[in-house]
Amino acid sequence: MPEPVISISETCRERLGYAAAFTPALLDPEIGEPEVIAGPNGKSAKKRYDVYRNNVTVSLINALSDTFPATQRIVGEEFFRAMARLHVRQSPPTSPLLSDYGRDFPDFIEDFEHARNLPYLADVARIERAWLDAYHAADAAPLHGHMLTAIPPETLGQAVFTTHPATRVVRSRFAAVTIFSVNRRNEPFGRVKAGEPEDALVTRPRLEVFVRRLPPGGARFLESLMAGEPFRKAVDAALEEDGDFDLTANISGVIEAGVFTAVMVSEHGDNG
């Protein structure tokens, strides 16, 4: 069966061509205004275009400021907006949704020369991005503890879990969870030992997003379960990372946080 022929009207072609010519200069001040635009009576539209260009840039910077308030508080508004402006020029949006913008901003921060003296900053930004993604994630009923206890102990090792759409894990070599938490509140705080590793669990079992610090081995345990590994392999992975991994504490924390929505025992058994 022949493929259908898609016809693009001349008007559509003109609009696409106009957009292609109009857009590139918006985020690059080194590029002059497009030749396709003109003011009244054919006069130059440079000033009008510059105003529009500035509005676009400011809107994107404001979107980053809204997404990363803790990051901005750490470095200060002036530094943040200067850093964000450079990111906007380097990474224009690919989605019409402003809430989608800034996914690669933490990576930009990590490579940003002037933020090297704040090595934890990128991980704080990653937690903030995860917070927003959890906020916009689909709703789902969290797994109840009785569903887990109903599984016979001899088959629990074969259990496979379904992850809640809002669940995120962010690992850090720094005290990113603590730094994130104290900077999301407009309150004074004491000294933070930034060099202590902390892993974050971000969830939204119902209406509110929660960010929790995971216990030792907890991130490895959750990452394994979220990847579809059976329960026994996830426990082994956590113990390999931390010999003092507390399974009871981690399981109760996972259930309380609403990390999963369902659990089932594989019919093929556990070959691990």
Image: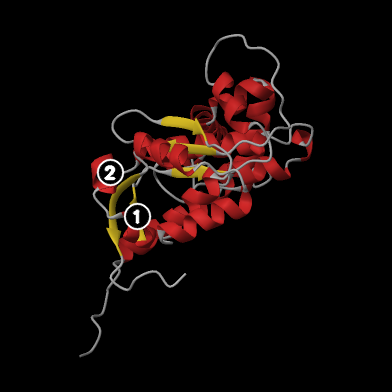
Closer to the camera, 7 or 195? Answer: 195
Image quarter where the N terminus lies is: bottom left
Residue 32 - label: none
Residue 132: percent from left, percent from top = 43, 36
Point out residue 111 in the picture as x, y percentages from the top left corner.
Answer: 72, 45
Left/right placement of residue 264 relative to residue 221 reads left
Q: Is residue 69 above or below residue 104?
A: above
Say left or right for 49 vs 268: right
Q: In the rendered image of this protein, does residue 23 appear above or below residue 120? A: below
Under mark 2, the amino acid is Leu
Residue at image coords 72%, 25%? 193
Residue denoted by label 1: 161
Residue 64: horizontal and vertical position, in percent?
A: 53, 33
Question: Callout 2: helix, strand or loop?
Answer: loop
Q: Residue at x 29, y 47 (%)?
A: 148
Say if mark 1 contacts mark 2, CB within 8 Å: yes
Picture quarter containing residue 134? Answer: top left
Q: Give residue 18's quadrant in the image.
A: bottom left
Location of residue 86 in the rendering, given as x and y in whole percent from the top left corner: 66, 39
Q: Residue at x 62, y 25 (%)?
A: 179
Residue named by callout 2: 143
Q: Which residue is found at the position 32% from the left and 61% from the top?
A: 155
Dot 2 crowding, Cα within 10 Å, few <14, some 14–19, many 20+:
many
